[in-house]
Amino acid sequence: MMNEAELLAFQKSVLDDPITQDVWRSKYRFGDETSIAESRERVVDGVYANEGVGALRFYDEALELVQRGILIPAGRVNAGAGTGRRVTLMNCFVNETVQDSMPGIARAISRASLTLQQGGGIGTAWGTVRPAGAVVRRTSSVASGTIPFMRWMNAMAATAASAGDRRGAMMGTLPIDHPDLWNPDQHVLGKDVRGADILTSPSFLSVKTRPGELTFMNISVLVTNAFMKAVEEGADWDLGFHIPRADGKHVAVYDKPLSYDVREVDEDLQIQSADGPSFEKGYVQPWYVYRRLPARKLWDEILRTTYKYAEPGVIFIDRVNSRNNLSYCEDITATNPCGEQPLGPDNVCCLGSVNLAFLVKDPFTGKASWDIDLYRHAIRAGVRFLDNVLDVTNYPLTAQREASMAVRRIGLGITGFGDALVQMGIRYGSEESVQIARHLSHVLQIESYQASMELAKERGPFPAFDRKEFAKGYNVKLLPEKLQDEIYTHGIRNGVLNTIAPNGTISLYVGNVSSGHEPVFSFAPTTRKVRQPDDTVKDYEVVPYSLRLWREIQKERYTAHGMSDPTRLAAPLPDYFIGALDLTPEEHLLVHGAWQEHIDAAVSKTINCPASMSFEDFRDVYSRAYALGAKGATTYRPDPDSGRGSVLSEESRPTIETDEETNALYAPEDPKGGDVLAAQLGLPEGSLDLGASPPPEAASDAPIPPINDDSDGSGPPPRPTVLDGKTYKLKWPVDGVNWYITVTNDGSRVRELFIAGGDPEAREWVEALARTTTAVLRRDGDVRFLVDELERVTSAKGGAFVEKRFRPSIVAAIGGVLREEIERLGDTQKSRRINDMKTRECEREMPKMTVFHPPAGGEVCRKCGSASWVREAGCQRCLSCGEEVCG
């Protein structure tokens, strides 16, 4: 058992972890800062720069909490605060209402580019743009719809990303009744000018089913309560717009009020106004029904696309708006790219989190409990901290500053919940974990509102505060009556206070705690590749904070009991050491719903679903999410047919011999520990009866056994732990697709072939080619015959010249790359020289290829081309090069 001083020392020591140091150096270090502590002090200095001398105690409190890793500012704040650079400290933005005209659309794309330039992610609602097939009266033409304009914005983001290190994260939303959402021809294929397959009539649902489409943009559907009711009742559903079809073939026409303001574009653009007069929201106009179909069919179309391609996400938009504190002064139709921050037009949000992983007292004992007082203290300090950030940040646009100042929205949340539960000996997804989530969420809400009310006494309420309207809010009514009365009397400083963001990078920054309220992703040995400033990558072992702490405590216990053999500790890890992929979707949902109950905005959560899950069960996940009060749902299900693999592969846990001595060592110190926890949480006695925990397992330092290591001598020789490798980029002129071919060697001969990129529809033969070739290469002997055969393969689509040499197929071109590597190593005695083919290397050379490889069948990374682009915790990242989008 660790005492408080030892636990504090351990929490400080995790900052020396190589991956934590790498995150600091590459993302948050400024100038000649020599330590994380120095960077953290700079951040607090910058955030409290406008505080008076009388507020010194608030500065001291914040500095202590930030230095201890308990209060964690968002990444933008860590990177920019106190640097003097004109950058934004905001993570989340939503675009203005897009006006339905070419000038209006161009303006929205321009404003998004300025936001991305300063590092902010931005969401755009496309529901105000007329659908494909609508009449354009000014030019007597037919509208192209929303998809081409979304592609335009995506191209802008690609340009912004190529100009620097900005990630260009965006979100695009479309309402459930917009005609561009679905059409009967959305999956029909045609040919482009190069002969490649394209969708002839792509819809919002089908556009991202094709590779290379909207790669910088997540998409989500805005689902209404009326639609969910229509699904339940088996009713029809209309897709329509306030502008008629050009062909006049409407299913029906009826009056409907406008859901947004139609206005002219600003005069400073010196261009014509929007197509037609200006109208205020609520103005009744004819609504033309373009298509009518059963609601259940449309719902199934949405979910089947998500089942296979992981998009679109679903946002329950009526719930978002009805539970928005500011519903009396703003309408929400979009979110930030991660989905957890719904925002009104031009609005922003600054983020920060309280680290629950560092708030467990007496971890891994029967006495484990929450430091609830420190939790409350950190929340109150966090509200003041984020309110200060609103005043010291730079805003990309004047309209964003004005919107932010009007409502002073902040997003204080939590991170490290999964690691905290493990320290408590509680299984994620259990009834105990759900109760704890609900309680901690409520504490977060009460303390945040209390602190913001106190700030209103000192600094005044947010300008758009309306005491009567605010008092009607869904979240306000969940507060104690005394606090409701105080808010009515004194006002409140911040219009919205709580959210739970993905927190991927900042969770690594404090010692690799679990992200947000997600479970620990995996306790199996995992390697993560992180891109370096010189464009190389480094491999890091990633050990969850709770597992690292548990190992340290076991070492102490082993020493205290004088055990003779440290490897004889125990059998499998206790069952509360459970990773995200081992949980059921229902367990994910229960915790998700419990946290959402008291969160103002929304919570970022990826519900991991097994590849074997049936579509019917998958559909039930969304029904349960809606029933449990979620404001949205994002799922990830591996689907090899779509080219999307599993998020990470796990090694099996080793079993180690045990004995009575070690089993007796880990008996719980306090069998009534559950009652201690229940008392601190204000729950009934006995409701958290944790019981005796299974004996923990020793950490094994043994290397991961290599794949296909036949030790009986009948197969190929064992694969070395490390092989040199080289990656070639090969652009196939026939279809313009990039292929990435990696060839590894042991110093004397070629041993493996890996193929990434290319056409996802060719995934099966690509994998077969790589596996078969590797099987031959791993055996000794002359392999000339294999290269000869590959170079003879012809394609029905025809060959092409690659670097001045004709190749009859992409397979033949891959064979040429393989021959060049074999010849370079002198592996064959007689080999035809390839003088004309000077295949240049990919953007980087991988000097070391470790035994860990990204999972086969992942999506293709736009940065390095490897098939290891995955979705995790509401974000997307590449497991090979470290490229990351949002989070």
Image: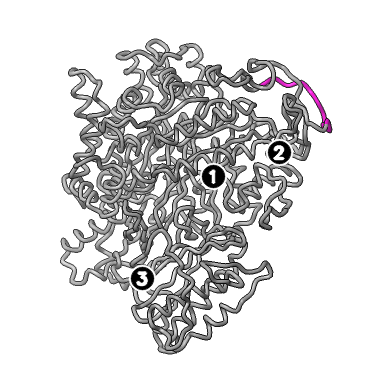
Left or right of 192? Residue 860 is left
Tell me if label 3 and label 1 are in contact, CB under 8 Å. no
- Residue 189 lies in the magenta-colored region: no
Q: Is residue 459 above or below residue 820?
A: above
Left or right of 616? Residue 592 is left
Mark 1 vs mark 2, foreground winner is: 1
Q: Is residue 258 above or below residue 861?
A: above
Quarter holding residue 55: top left
Pointer 1: what residue?
634
Tag 2 or tag 3, which sits nearer the N-term?
2
**Residue displayed at 71% across by 33% down:** 143
- Residue 250 lies in the magenta-colored region: yes
The type of residue carrying mark 2 is: Glu
* Residue neighbourhood size for the residue with mark 3, other residues' Cα within 10 Å, grouped as few (<14), some (14–19), many (≥20): few
Pointer 2: what residue?
232
Which residue range is magenta in the image? 248-258
* Residue neighbourhood size for the residue with mark 2, other residues' Cα within 10 Å, grouped as few (<14), some (14–19), many (≥20): few
Pointer 3: what residue?
704
Disc 1 and disc 2: Cα gap in Å? 21 Å
The type of residue carrying mark 3 is: Ile
Q: Is residue 65 above or below residue 849?
A: above
Quarter holding residue 698: bottom left
**Residue displayed at 47% across by 12% down:** 466
Left or right of 822? Residue 211 is right
Q: Which quadrant holds the C terminus?
A: top left
Disc 3 and disc 1: Cα gap in Å? 33 Å
Disc 3 and disc 2: Cα gap in Å? 50 Å
Residue 251: horizontal and vertical position, in percent? 82, 32
